[in-house]
Amino acid sequence: MNDMLEKLYAAKAAVRESDEAREPLAVLRERALSRMRERRNFREALAGARGPAIIAEIKRASPSVGIIVPKLDPSEIAREYEAAGADAISVLTESDHFLGDLAYVDIARAASTLPILRKDFLSSRYEVAQSAAYGADAVLAIVAGLSDERLAEMVDEARRYALGVLVEVHTEDELRRAVAAGARILGINNRNLHTFETDLAVTEELLPLVPSGTIVISESGVKSQDDVRRLVAQGARGVLVGESLMRSDDKHEAIRALKGATVTA
Ligand SMILES: O=P(O)(O)OC[C@@H](O)[C@@H](O)c1c[nH]c2ccccc12
């Protein structure tokens, strides 16, 4: 694991410990199960999307670029994303480097009808149950930061609450591990977590190695209709877009443009 990732997971483990002292796993599991009827199907939303599936991200800051938007109204952004035609919403909940908050998940959920992905450096059953209890419909599992055992535990815990799992990979080896863990929704991250550089060629290189029936979402560095066109032409079902949408003053037009990519693809 690289330094940055290691730091993020270590900080997260400390947060988890204090959370656990306040709200034990059993309490969260019960609450997660009591919210089963609210669950929105992340996988179906992507599979059934018209044109390329767009996961629009709510992200206030990131380690690679710093502050993206000084003030954030997650409710308003969630509403805008849905009205603009997004298929799902990703919410950063990591607080130190991304200035996120777990509460944003339920805020985004209340403001839209789309499935909500909790994006964070999660590595335990506890955090998966917590995500479901706090209104998530799907969680992120970053293979580079997880042992096979941890990954399997997260996938197993997610199944209990019918949560989707977006299994993120960046290399061929990680892709193999994701497939072995039974990943049905793969996120191919174009960003190299050592250098923070993005290169859409990462998705293009890994796509031919993905088993059929797996939904592939290309993540990071996607900005234009041409980018989406290129990625879907290679077999991606859709894209996850953060920074370029957060910076856009006209989210409606921005998403419409990304969506329009299949028309000629
Ligand atoms: O802002 P971008 O370049 O559109 O990227 C979005 C998303 O892919 C990125 O936020 C991301 C991908 N994997 C992550 C893991 C943790 C935190 C954030 C991420």
Image (tube, helix red, strand yellow):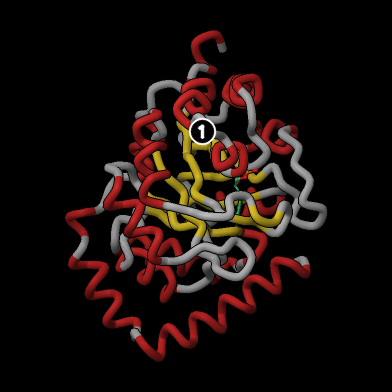
Determine which residue is flagged by label 1.
Answer: 212
Q: Quadrant of residue 208?
A: top right
| Residue 210 sits above or below residue 137 on the image | above
Residue 188 percent location from the top left of the image: 62, 43
Left or right: where 222 falls relative to 124: right
Q: Nearer the viewer, residue 87 or 163?
A: 87
| Residue 221 sits above or below residue 31 on the image | above
Q: Residue at x 39, y 29 (%)?
A: 85
Q: Nearer the viewer, residue 23 or 98?
A: 98
Q: Residue at x 51, y 33 (%)?
A: 212
Residue 117 percent location from the top left of the image: 43, 52
Q: Residue at x 70, y 72 (%)?
A: 6
Q: Residue at x 51, y 57 (%)?
A: 92
Q: Amino acid at mark 1?
A: Ser
| Residue 169 sits above or below residue 31 on the image | above
Could you tell me which quadrant the N terminus lies in?
A: bottom right
